[in-house]
Image (cartoon, grey):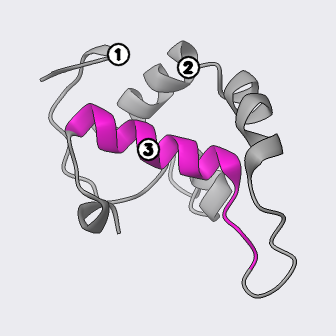
Amino acid sequence: MLCKFGAVPECSFKTELKSDTLLGLGTSTKSTRRREFLDEMDQVVPWSELVALIAPYLPEGKGGRSPFQVEALLRIHFIQQCFTLSAPSME
């Protein structure tokens, strides 16, 4: 399969982000196609620069549920665009 980041192996994962540690899931050290793709995406995408550009425009989350982390939202959006997935398929 080909996406914006180059050749990508077929993946059959739902919504686990590269930074499994972001979600507290970084317990396995097994190398999977999903993990390899997300590691490659980390090398290509300047996450900290993108977060710095977007963060000033996000709502503060003063009332109600706290907002999602900017980096998590960006990663989800990139995966959606790369694999042409809908929002419900990312849940």
Marked residue nearer the N-terminal end (2 or 1): 1
Look at 65% across and 44% down and name the residue there: 71
Q: Residues within 10 Å of mark 1 (few under 14, many from 20)?
A: few
Q: Residues within 10 Å of mark 2 (few under 14, many from 20)?
A: few
**How far from the left and from the top, in percent, is residue 65?**
72, 84
- Residue 5 got which mark? 1
Q: Amino acid at mark 1?
A: Phe
Q: Amino acid at mark 2?
A: Val
Task: Find out whether the residues at labels 2 and 1 contact each other: C-beta distance under 8 Å.
Answer: yes
**How far from the left and from the top, in percent, is residue 15?**
38, 59
Q: Which residue is mark 3?
A: 77
Q: Amino acid at mark 3?
A: His
Q: Magenta residues?
A: 66-83
User: Where is the C terminus found, in terms of image quarters?
Assistant: bottom left
70 left or right of 89?
right
Look at 27% across and 54% down and name the residue there: 13
Q: Callout 2: helix, strand or loop?
A: loop
Query: Is residue 31 in sight in this rendering?
Result: no
**Most common SS among magenta residues:** helix
In the rendered image, the vertical position of residue 50 relative to residue 23, given as above or below:
above
Q: Which picture quadrant has residue 25?
A: bottom right
In the rendered image, the vertical position of residue 89 relative to residue 26, given as above or below:
below
57 left or right of 18?
right
Q: Nearer the viewer, residue 87 or 6?
A: 87
On whether residue 81 falls in the magenta region, the answer is yes
Give the spatial CA distance, label 2 vs label 1: 9 Å
Q: Which picture quadrant has residue 53?
A: top right
On whether residue 79 falls in the magenta region, the answer is yes
Q: Which residue is mark 2?
A: 45
